[in-house]
Amino acid sequence: MILRSTAFPDLSMCVALAHELAEISAGIIRPLFRSPALNVDDKADLTPVTAADRDSEAAMRERIREVFPDHGVIGEEFPAENPDAEFVWVLDPVDGTGALVSGLPTFGTLIGLCHRGTPVLGLINQPISDERWIGLTGEQTLFNGERAKVRAVRSLDQATIFTTALDCFASDSDRSAFERLAGKTRLRRFGCDCYAYGLLALGWCDLVCETGLKVHDFTALVPVITGAGGRMTGWDNRPLDLSSDGRVLASTGEPLHREALEILTGTKGATPS
């Protein structure tokens, strides 16, 4: 199957480029997985970074400049380029560097595209297992070329919830809010970073709840989740964009999303924005 967008007909070239960027990054990351050549440094915030992060983002940026010199780029490892452009690519070369340096194949490369600040295209690539999700906002999500779809879990007591780690929550109140929500679910799981969102799009879990995410962490995920029939918003129930605060909830859709937000925020009767 080939993804096309009726809202943005010219995105066919962007879809092709997203796939090309995934191949470029995979070619750099794959040889370093579980390799003694993978040297790990610490950023200023003490989170790990490797040559896989830096080199793959640099290579993707170079290719974007060649194909779309007027597009902007926001990435994790280097300063933003032309971030006020109409179209801005948002890159996370290794979402889950902690997993990469621990030898776990649950990290992923995130490639997103925003149109006037709103995510319109998203790709998750897992280069070790050769798994790829790509979605367009308002259209559909494909997983390795086949349609991806969330499952029809509609109540919290039947739901599986993911988050990367409890210590990732930005404040004690946010952590308590997650604990309230997770306590209502059937099963909670930790880890997986962006891979958890891919599992949601495939129907293997029902909620992903996190805080403290940067735009490169969530931009690519929005079209993947919504294209699979799910919902992804901020905790304030607003659509995610480049100005969002990094508190996100992804779900299989209503009414599960609404019920989860009510527990997170302590507000009853929330309606979709």
Image (cartoon, helix red, strand yellow):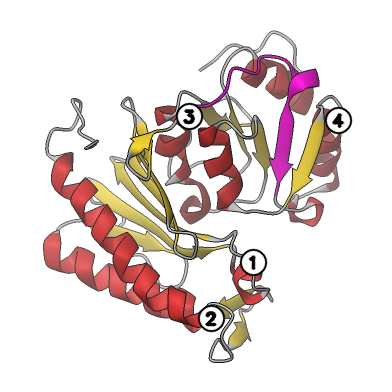
Mark 2 or mark 1, whichever is nearer to me: 1
**Picture coordinates of residue 249, whole percent (x, y):** 62, 33
How many discs appear? 4
Q: Residues within 10 Å of mark 2 (few under 14, many from 20)?
A: some
The mark that comes first in sequence, 3 or 2, is: 2
Label 3 and label 1: CA atoms lie apart by 31 Å
Read off the residue under disc 2.
Answer: 50
Question: Looking at the picture, does residue 165 appear above or below residue 261?
Answer: below
Query: In this picture, which residue range is highlighted in magenta?
Result: 149-163
Residue displayed at 34% across by 29% down: 140
Read off the residue under disc 3.
Answer: 239
Query: Residue 104: which disc?
Result: 1
- Residue 212 visible in the displayed image: yes
Helix or strand or loop: what does disc 2 sit on?
Answer: strand
Label 1 and label 4: CA atoms lie apart by 29 Å
Residue displayed at 82% across by 27% down: 186
Query: Residue 180: which disc?
Result: 4
**Viewer-closest of 127 and 236:** 127
